[in-house]
Image (spheres, rainbow, N blue to C red):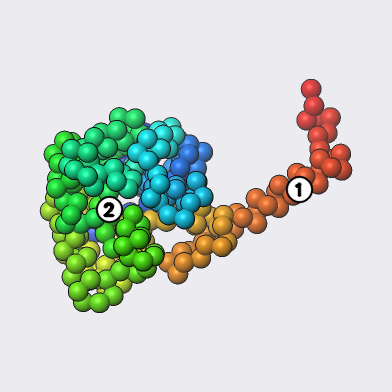
Amino acid sequence: MSRISAPDLLRRKIAGRTEDKITMVTAYDAQMARLVDMAGVDMVLVGDSLGMVIQGGNDTLSVTASEMAYHGRCVAAGLERAHLTVDMPFMSYQVSVAQAMRTAGLLVRKGKAQSVKLEGGVRSAPAIRAIVDAGIPVVGHVGLTPQSVNAFGGFRVQGRDQENAARILADAHAVAEAGAFAIVLEMVPQALAAQITAELGIPTIGIGAGVGCDGQVLVCTDMLGMDQRFAPRFLQRYANLEVTICEAVQGYIADVKSGAFPTPAHSY
């Protein structure tokens, strides 16, 4: 089975049909990757969100490029069909274009990425252009960019006022003009996201950006309900695995303590 490519995803935008909407889910290991791939998701993102989901941090800022490459390689092992995008983490591309190209190359060579994702619009356009010119497809990311959480003063909706909306629109156009084949719009008003989607020739993938985008992305553990403490407005849970997993482990504990497990059928 052939993997979905960047040109395949770009053609979805051109077709413009509802059934061509792009689905993206994060994954951080081979097992989760296998399951979301088997379910039919179009894109799998190894997000630097692993700093929070996997490492237990409060933000994404401590994740390294080598950690992204490691998790990318793990996820790639579980995929047969879905397109694999890997995040470029904080300060792995902001210093210089040369640094950005080295990081992108690392994520492709050692992380098995088919494309890389980096945050920022106008400021990141030179890096995007150079990476694309080197033959590596790029996904952009504007709006709430988690690596700028300290500058934003928290994880807040961006683009509510006219000045910031204009800045995000300019950022989106800069990403597209630099050669990215898709762009993530995070936590921006739905009217702004719809405007960006209408104006750009590349697919927009929303998270907290409304229904007008060309696709949507969610973090796997969020959509599966593995942490009930996390409940942002944009999240739709499709399972409640926190309860399911806890009940399963409690059943195991009870059976071991009662002697119900293991039985002769489980023994050699």
Query: In screen coordinates, is 260 left or right of 91?
Result: right
Instruction: Work out which quarter of the rendered image holds the N terminus and state it.
Output: top left
| Amino acid identity at mark 2 | Glu
- Quadrant in the picture for residue 264: top right
The residue lying at 86 percent from left, 39 percent from top is 259
Percent of width and height locating residue 257: 84, 42
- Packing grade of label 2 (10 A; few <14, some 14-19, many >=20) is many
Instruction: Work out which quarter of the rendered image holds the C terminus and state it.
Output: top right
Q: Earlier in the sequence, mark 2 or mark 1?
A: 2
Q: Which mark is residue 161?
A: none
Q: Which element carries disc 1, helix, strand or loop?
A: helix
| Amino acid identity at mark 1 | Gly
- Quadrant in the picture for residue 265: top right
Q: Which element carries disc 2, helix, strand or loop?
A: loop
- Packing grade of label 1 (10 A; few <14, some 14-19, many >=20) is few
- Quadrant in the picture for residue 262: top right
Percent of width and height locating residue 71: 42, 37
Residue 66 can be seen, yes or no? yes
The residue lying at 19 percent from left, 51 percent from top is 124
Percent of width and height locating residue 219: 44, 54
Disc 2 to disc 1, how far (Cα)? Answer: 44 Å
The residue lying at 22 percent from left, 38 percent from top is 99
Residue 34 can be seen, yes or no? no
Q: Disc 2 or disc 1, which is closer to the eye?
A: 2
The residue lying at 32 percent from left, 58 percent from top is 148
Quick check: marks 2 and 1 in contact, CB under 8 Å?
no
Residue 147's place in the image compared with 83, above or below, is below
Percent of width and height locating residue 151: 31, 62
Nearer to the camera, 94 or 226? 94
Report the residue that reaches farthest toward the bottom. 161
Residue marked by disc 1? 251
Residue marked by disc 2? 119
